[in-house]
């Protein structure tokens, strides 16, 4: 075990000029503490280049080297080169979080070391994602047979049903293949699973035990909600 390498991090490159979207993430390891993490960022960034490195997630673990190797194997189908992986839907961190929690990784709060230009790009990204979520909410809402209470979160639109007592969380994906998680469904997972499979949907269970369906268009998400609301009995 290498005691010097105790942090597993996920890093990306961003174009501070805002002209290109760079869909790659680096999964690597480094020494202990935010200072070491910041110095690793500086090594990867070229200060005279418009392409900067940004750490988007990090975890502390006593056997970081083994965890890194395991993550690289799991992500191998998306490997671009070395420790860099293609992250088309910008959800690599989201996929890693439950695995790191299961393996006992302690999440590290990332210190804000970005310059003003970088911060402006990050704000622009958040604003763009917020607009995309609002558009997706509208696309799904107009296809629902019965109106549901709704809101938008960072991950995507959410619909609330008083009839079934279910919550429909839609996680936005850039590719258009969004993820639907039906909250408050773990107590009826088996029956809801059978119901939705009977409708032709491939159902999975998320880390909290709720019903999940992935890679769905807005039209199909609306179909799932309409079918569940009109035909599924939660009692």
Image: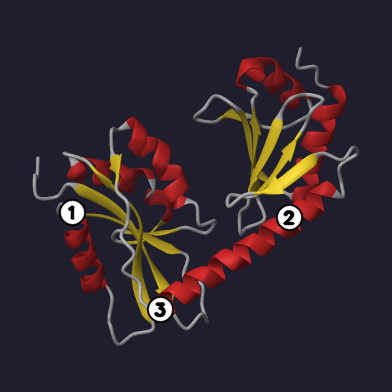
Image x and y of residue 137, in percent: 75, 52
Residue at mark 1 to residue at mark 3: CA–CA distance: 24 Å
**For residue 116, which numbered disc appears in the image?**
3
Q: Tell me: 9 left or right of 77.
A: left
Q: Considering the numbered disc 1 on the image, is that residue within a helix, a strand or a loop? A: loop
Image x and y of residue 212, in percent: 62, 33
Verify CB contact (< 8 Å) between mark 2 and mark 1: no
Mark 1, residue position: 33
- The N terminus sits in image quarter: top left
Neighbour tally class for label 1: few under 14, some 14-19, many 20 plus, Cα within 10 Å: few
Q: From the viewer's perspective, is residue 106 above or below residue 155? A: above
Q: Residue at x 32, y 51 (%)?
A: 109
Verify CB contact (< 8 Å) between mark 1 and mark 3: no
Nearer the observer, 157 or 194: 157
Image x and y of residue 63, in percent: 17, 39
Nearer the observer, 30 or 200: 30
Mark 2, residue position: 136
Q: Tell me: 32 left or right of 156.
A: left
Q: Give the image quarter of residue 209.
A: top right
Residue at mark 2 to residue at mark 1: CA–CA distance: 39 Å
């Amino acid at each position: 075990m290498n005691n010097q390498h105790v942090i597993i991090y996920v890093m990306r490159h961003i174009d501070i000029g805002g002209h290109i979207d760079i869909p790659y993430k680096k999964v690597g390891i480094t020494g202990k503490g935010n200072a070491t993490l910041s110095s690793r960022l500086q090594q990867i960034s070229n200060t005279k280049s418009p392409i900067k490195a940004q750490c988007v997630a990090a975890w502390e673990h006593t056997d970081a080297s083994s965890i890194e190797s395991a993550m690289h194997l799991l992500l191998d189908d998306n490997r671009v080169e070395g420790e860099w992986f293609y992250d088309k839907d910008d959800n690599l961190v989201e996929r890693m979080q439950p695995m790191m929690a299961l393996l006992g990784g302690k999440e590290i709060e990332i210190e804000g070391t970005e310059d003003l230009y970088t911060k402006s790009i990050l704000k622009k990204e958040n604003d763009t994602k917020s607009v995309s979520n609002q558009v997706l909410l509208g696309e799904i809402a107009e296809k629902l047979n019965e109106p549901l209470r709704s809101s938008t979160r960072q991950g995507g639109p959410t619909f609330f049903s008083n009839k079934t007592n279910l919550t429909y969380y839609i996680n936005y994906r850039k590719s258009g293949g969004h993820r639907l998680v039906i909250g408050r469904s773990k107590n009826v997972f088996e029956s809801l699973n059978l119901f939705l499979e009977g409708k032709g949907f491939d159902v999975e269970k998320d880390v909290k035990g709720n019903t999940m369906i992935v890679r769905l268009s807005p039209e199909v998400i609306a179909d799932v909600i309409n079918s569940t609301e009109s035909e599924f009995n939660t009692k």
